[in-house]
Image (spheres, helix red, strand yellow):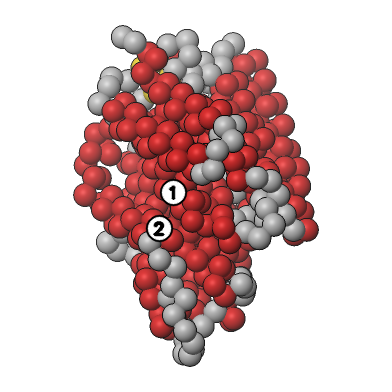
Amino acid sequence: MNYLFYSLPMIASLIGAFLCFVKREKFEEMISIIFAAFSLISAILILFLSDVSNSFFFIDGISKIMLIIISMIYTLTVIFSTTFLKYIEEPLFQKRFYYLLLNLFAFSMFFSVSVNNFGLIWVGIEATTVTSALLIAVENDESSIEATWRYIIIVSSGLVISFIANILIYAATGTLDISTLLSTNPTSEKLLVFGSMMAIVGYGTKAGIFPMHTWLPDVHGKAPAPVSAIFSGVLLPVALYAIIRVIQFSPISSVKTFALVLGFLTVIIASSLMAIQIHYKRLFAYSTMENMGMALIGISLGGYALLGVMILIISHAFAKSSTFFLSGNLFSRYKTTKIDEIKGVSKRMPSTAYALLFSAMAITGMPPFGTFFGEIMIILVLLATMPTGYTILLLSFLALAFISLNFKVGKMIFSNSEGENMERKRVGTIVPIIDTVLSLLIVFFIPWIEKVIR
C-alpha cells in the first residue's frame, strides 16, 4: 500500500502555505482555497481506505473523523477569511502572511492526528501554538497582543506538563508508539498513572479544560472571528484527541476518575461563568469550554459514550465555528462585543440573526442537532455507571448553560431597534449557514460514525 496517500491533507496545506510567499494580488486567497479544498477531498477519500499503523502513521476511525473535521472547518475558515479581513483596519502583517500561518496551522493539526507516536503528537500540538499565536494578534491592538502573550505562556506551560508526561509514560512502558501502547495490557504502575494524569492536564490546557482554561475567553474575546472559529471548532478537539489516546492505552480506574472529575469541574465552571457574561464572544468561548468538559466526561466513561463524544465534537465544530463567524458579522457592523449594545439584529441583519439563533441552539444541545444526541449518549452511560446524583448535577449545569446562552442570544436578536439594514452579503452569511446546516445533518450519519470508530 502506498502510505503517501494518507499524508495528502498535510501535503496540501503545506504547499498552500509555501505558495503564499508569491507576491501577487489575491493569489494567496485563491491558492489557500484550492489547497484547503484539496485537503478536504483527500480526507474524504481516506475514509474509504483501510486503517493504517506503521512506524509513522496511525490512522484509525477516530483519526479519519478528525481529518474530516479539520479539513472542513479549515476550508470554510479560509473562504470566510477572504471577505472578513477587509474589516481589519490596521492588521499586524500583510494578508499573505495571515494565509501562510493559517495553512501551517492546519498542517500542524493534520500532523497531530495522523502520527503513531506521542512524542510526535506533542510536536504537532506545540506547532499549533507556534503557527496560531500571531493569528490572534492580527487586529494589532494592545488587548489582542496581551491575549496572545497569555495564550503562549499558559498553553506552553501545559505543553511542558505534557512533555514531562511523555517522559514518564516512556519510562513506565518503554515506548511512545500509540499502536504498541494500545496492544499491551496496561498496569497500575504509579509511574504510568501519574504520567497519564499529567498528560490529561497538559493536553487539557490546550483543550480549555479546568483549571488551565484561563487563556480561552481572552483569546476568543480578542481574536478575529475566523481565527476564533478554527480555534474553537478544531484546535481544542485536536488536543482532546491526544487525551482520547491516553485513556485508550491507560484505561486505569484512577486515571479515568481523574478525567471525569476534571470534566465535571469544567462544565460547572463554564456554565456558571456563562450566566454572568456581558460580551458575546466570551460567552461563546465559555460555551466551547462547557462542550469540551462534556466531551472529557464521555472520554473518561468510554464505550458507547465515546460515540457520543465523536458526535458531539463533529456537531460542535460546525455549530461553534458558525457562531464565531456570525459574531464577526455582528462586530463588523455594531463595532462592539457587549451584549446589551447589540439590538434588533433580526430587523437589521436578518440572515445573520436567524443563523445565529439556530447555531446557538445547536451548541447548547437543542434537538434535533447532533450535539443533543452526543450529549444524550454520554448522559445515558453516566446514568448507567455512576450514582444518579452525578447525572442530576450535570443536567443542572447543562440547563444553566442552555438558558444563559440562548437568553442572551435571543435578547440580541429580538430586542427592538430602528435603523438601516446592515446585513453582510454572500460569503459572510452563506458560510455560517452551511456550518449550521451541517451541524443538523450530522444526525443522519450517526450509524456511519459508529461503524467507522468501532
Q: Residue at x 59, y 81 (%)?
A: 341
Mark 1 crowdedness (10 Å alpha carbons): few <14, some 14-19, many ≥20: many
Q: CA distance from mark 1 to mark 2?
A: 8 Å
351 in relation to 381, above or below: below
| Quarter placement of the N terminus | top left
Question: Does residue 319 appear in the picture of this structure?
Answer: yes
- Element type at mark 1: helix
- Which amino acid type is marked by label 1? Ile
Seen from the viewer's position, the closer of residues 266 and 242 is 242
Q: Position of residue 347 (x, y in %)?
A: 41, 83
Residue at the spot x=28%, y=28% of the render? 45
Q: Mark 2 belongs to which amino acid?
A: Val
Q: Are marks 1 and 2 in contact (CB under 8 Å)?
A: yes
Label disc, if present, on residue 134 of the rendered structure: none
Q: Could one spot residue 197 in this view of the protein?
A: no
Residue at image coords 71%, 49%: 92
| Residue 316 horizontal/vertical position (percent) | 41, 52
18 to the left or right of 63:
right
**Badge number at residue 427:** 2
User: Does residue 53 lie above or below 415 as drawn?
Assistant: above
* Residue 279: % across, % down: 61, 70
Q: Quadrant of the C terminus?
A: top left
Horizontally, residue 255 falls left or right of residue 450, namely: right
Q: Which mark is residue 79?
A: 1
